Amino acid sequence: MGADEVKIYLIRALAATTGGYMAEISDFGTFGRFQETPVGEMSPEMKDAYDFTMKLRGVVPGPHKIWLANPALSKTIVPTGYYYQKESTLTKAEIEIVTNIINGQWRAAYGNYEHEQIGEKQGHLEPKSVEALIAGLPTSFSDPREQSICELALALANHRVVPTGLYKRCKDLLGDAGIVDVTVLMGWFTMVSLTLMAFDVPSNAVGIDQ
């Protein structure tokens, strides 16, 4: 039995011997409110979605743990995440600029915690810039592409209007394919954030090691 499973067992045992306590922890799960299913206990459909995610991502990270509850939908979602990992027209730094803007907008604890680190370590962005993106504070980037992506994402997230001049600058630097990459990525991390918020996933969640 792993450490997380031991923790759950002890809490449930305490709840069973303490009147009324169970109601107070009824939302406790292995990943926020979500109660993960061990691999050996998964239905064939869930196991198929789990294997599909592992094949593309090598892990079942963050919200993917929760999406397994809807295996058919999970299998349609995973390829989009894989695309942004391996095939996007955007660099990792550009992806993390957009990601941290959207995570900051939705304030999902787990997403903000994870991507503050990812933006710095994998995106190689300045810590102060990442912090500003999350907190909605002013920041700028010396790279013209990064700056245009930041402006586009902020314009869409904040005022939902993209001025013609900004569009033309983005078109010149990113092309239509790059603009589509940015807008769909914003939708992707909105979906991620809403999933994490619905299941109240805290910043320090780890889930079952499997």
Image (spheres, rainbow, N blue to C red):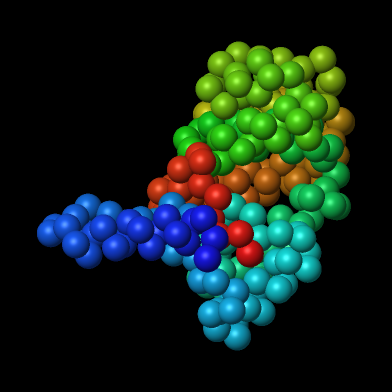
Task: Work out whether residue 34 can be spotted.
Answer: no
Instruction: Give above or below for 154 relative to 58.
Output: above
Going 38% across and 63% down the picture, which residue do you hit?
9
In the depicted view, which residue is nearer to us: 40 or 141?
A: 40
Indicate left or right for 70 with 162 as reference: left
**Marker count (numbered):** 0
**Furthest residue toward bottom:** 44
Within the image, what quadrant is residue 145 found in?
top right
Indicate left or right for 197 with 158 as reference: left
Instruction: Give above or below for 56 relative to 203.
Output: below
Going 42% across and 55% down the picture, which residue do you hit?
7
* Residue 192 x/y as whole percent: 56, 50
Going 52% across and 65% down the picture, which residue do you hit?
1
In the depicted view, which residue is nearer to us: 35 or 21?
A: 21
* Residue 40 x/y as whole percent: 59, 79
| Image quarter hosting the C terminus | bottom right
Indicate left or right for 28 with 103 as reference: left
Within the image, what quadrant is residue 61 found in?
bottom right
